[in-house]
Amino acid sequence: MSLPRRVRILGLSLIAAGSILAATISNIGTAEAKPIDVVATTSMIADAARQVAGDRAKVTALMGPGVDPHSYRQTRSDIVAMTRADLVLRHGLYLEAQLEDFFLDLEKRKNVVAVGEAIDPSLLLNFAGHEGRHDPHVWMDPQLWETVVLAVRDALINTDPEGEATYRANAQTHIADIKKLITYMKSVTKTVPEHSRVLLTAHDAFSYFGRGFDFTVMGIQGISTESEAGLRRVEELVNTIVDRNISAVFVESSVPERNVRALIEGAGARGQKVEIGGTLFSDAMGDPGTYEGTYIGMIDHNSTLITRALGGDAPATGMQGKLAAGS
């Protein structure tokens, strides 16, 4: 074989070997690109993280269905999960009141982001009786929650810059879905008669909903479920029920309903028949794997239930026909 031919064959062999090596290295890099580990305090934040991150993150929620974030205390397994996570997403605004000191310490060592605090303070409602604090229940108004979704997106980008394009695209898609939810909420809640636009619940978790969709909101307990409902407060609300001829009050999935029952009994003693309009999701979403176990489903459930119970017109299965029958 001539020398030039040998050189040509050797060159082709080296090119082929280089291509195989490059492909192998690429495959190894892909195989080693594990999803980042994200821990979120509430189920609402966890849902936002899953919607934005997609397959690029493994998202764990510390608080599941029916869990009250105001009184929640970290467990040993929570501490382990958060100290090992690439990113910890908390709500802030003093929602996780019992975890405040823990987070102040954790923030010194770990990547912790309070996504609820991304909202412009001028848009937040004051926490009555607590100077300098705000009502943390911002997820009740999807128009505010859009900002939280963007804060989650930015936290993911800062943690995993290589996924920026994915995070931006997914966030845009999720916000588009939230805007559809807002349009639905406006269309159905406006059908509730003026005299019936009073939302009476177990605690003051729905003030942002009331402001955003023109309802008077009253809670038996304060913004935090840690506050007690006094006899005077119950008597005041019974008077309101009778004076305004309110026919429905609501219980919450994460708050015991005993105080609501006391209201119904008090109104009944005054000759005013009041029914439980249903169970609202306040501080936690529904069961994982269900439509109500997503942020969109949670708010769809609440707005549909409130509208129908207070005399308005909304489809029983919600804006997408996905709500559980009778939910």
Image (tube, rainbow, N blue to C red):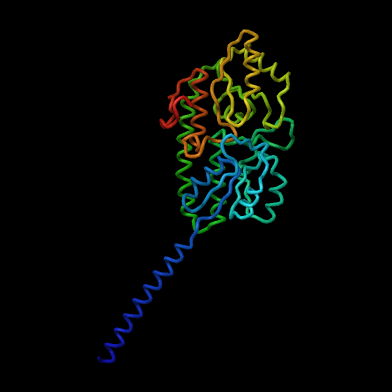
**Residue 245 x/y as whole percent:** 59, 12
Residue 111, by quadrant, is: bottom right
Q: Nearer the viewer, residue 119 or 282?
A: 282
**Which residue is nearer to you in this view: 146 or 218?**
218
Which sits in the foreground, 296 or 117?
A: 296
The image quadrant where one finds the N terminus is bottom left
Q: Residue 173: x, y in percent?
A: 45, 44
State the count of labels: 0
User: Is 239 placed left or right of 53 in the picture?
Assistant: right
The answer to whether residue 238 is above or below residue 326 is above
Quadrant of residue 250 in the image?
top right
Q: Position of residue 52 (x, y in %)?
A: 49, 47
Residue most toward the top? 271
Residue 194, image quadrant: top right
User: In the picture shown, does residue 313 fall above or below 113?
Assistant: above
Instruction: Please state which of residues 246 and 284 is positioned toward the viewer in this rendering.
Output: 284
Question: Vertically, is 194 above or below 61?
Answer: above
Q: Extreme left residue here?
A: 1
